[in-house]
Each structure stands twice: as structure tokens, then as C-alpha cells.
Amino acid sequence: MTCDCAPTHIESAAQRKMLRMALTLNAAMFVIGTLLGYWAQSTGVLADALDMLTDAIAYGLALQAASRGAAFKRHSAQYSGLVLLLLGAGIAAQALWRWYAGSQPVGPAMMAYAVVSFAVNLYVLTKLTRFRHDGVHLSASYLCTRADVLANIAVFVCGGVIVVTGAHWVDLLVGFAIALYVFKEAGEILRQARLAR
């Protein structure tokens, strides 16, 4: 028999501290990634930056849910899933637009952003691991961050391919791939929220 008890004050305080840190780091990386993505004409970096924004929103929702009841946590996870769906659509639209308009992504800039973003996400993921089973709202945050780590790796590889081969189309491919992965993560979060009754 499971207990749907609220976390203790100490657990809630630790969760809030971790979520505030994750929110700050992801918001900063969203701003950096958006500016760099437009400058570097990279769909992959822009997709990664938008994913960081989604994570920042998810952390903000989880922060609000940390000291609330199960219903609020479930709704928080649902909102995170819906925001991820919107993000996936935005990423796909950006990739289509760049395919139509053309772009010349800058591989070294993509790789540099991916390395910094990967370090931030890996750090946040290690902090979230401790709390990922403490509620659907934290599980959703964990899944969002896990998706970011994989996106960072994809952007880094993409930048490397562009540097070595000059094949700019791989940036669009990575943008679409990130969009598809974001849709998958959104479905998983919404499923967990639905089951957390």
C-alpha cells in the first residue's frame, strides 16, 4: 500500500532549492542558446535552447508543486507535457522554415554551445535523480532534463559533421529529431500524469 503523503518540510526545502537552481541555469542557457542559435543559423541550437525554456517552465511548475497536494502535482506534470508538445511543434516549424529559406549553420559555435549546455544539464540531472520518484511533477522534470542531455549530444555531433563535411542539412535533421524526441517525452509525461490519480 502506497502513501500519498506530502513530503516533509526538509524534503520540500531541498526540492525547492534544487528546482530554483535548475530553473536559473536553464533560463540562462535558453537566453544564450537563442542568441547563439540565431547568430549561428542553427536549427539544432535553437531547438536545444527552446528545450531549455521548456525545462525552465517545467522547473517553475514543479517548484510551485513542491509543497502542494497530489492534484496540483498532477496538473503541473500535465502542463509540462502540454508545453513540450507546443515546443515540439515550434521546433518542427523552425526546421521547415530554415529548409525553405536556407541557412549556413556555424559548426564550431554549435559544438561550443552543446558542450556548455551538456555540462549544465548533466549537473541538473544528477541533482534531480535523488528526487525523481518523489512525485509526478519531479518525474516530469527529470524526463525533460534527460531529453536535454540527449539533445546536447545530437547538437554536438551535428556541429562536428558540419565542420568536417560542410553538410548543412544535418542541422535540419537534428532539429526534426529533437522535435520528435520532445513529442515522445511529452507523451510519456502526460501518460504518467494521467496514471497518477
Image: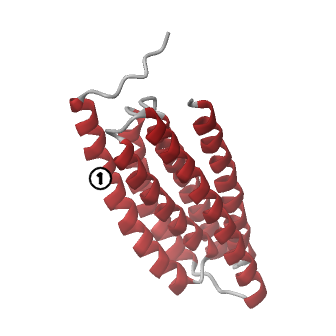
Query: With respect to residue 84, does 101 lie above or below?
Result: below
Residue 180 falls in image quadrant: bottom right
Secondary structure at numbered mark 1: helix
Residue 74 % position (x, y): 51, 39
Residue identified by numbered label 1: 20
Q: Which sits in the foreground, 142 or 187?
A: 187
* Left or right of 142, for residue 102: right
The quadrant the C terminus occupies is: top right
Residue 195 % position (x, y): 62, 31
Q: Which sits in the foreground, 141 or 175?
A: 141
Q: Is residue 141 visible?
A: yes
Q: Which sits in the foreground, 103 or 131?
A: 131
Residue 86 % position (x, y): 63, 64
Q: Residue at x 42, y 35 (%)?
A: 129
Query: With respect to residue 104, does 72 lie above or below?
Result: above
Residue 83 falls in image quadrant: bottom right
Q: Residue at x 39, y 40 (%)?
A: 128
Q: Is residue 167 visible?
A: no
Query: With respect to residue 147, does 95 lie above or below?
Result: below
Q: Residue at x 67, y 77 (%)?
A: 94
Query: Which residue ends up furthest to the top in the rendered image?
Result: 1
Residue 75 % position (x, y): 51, 45
Residue 72 falls in image quadrant: top left
* Left or right of 99, for residue 123: left
Structural crowding at the residue carrying mark 1, measured as other residues with C-alpha within 10 Å and reported as few (<14), some (14–19) or many (≥20): some
Three-letter amino acid code at the position of disc 1: Arg
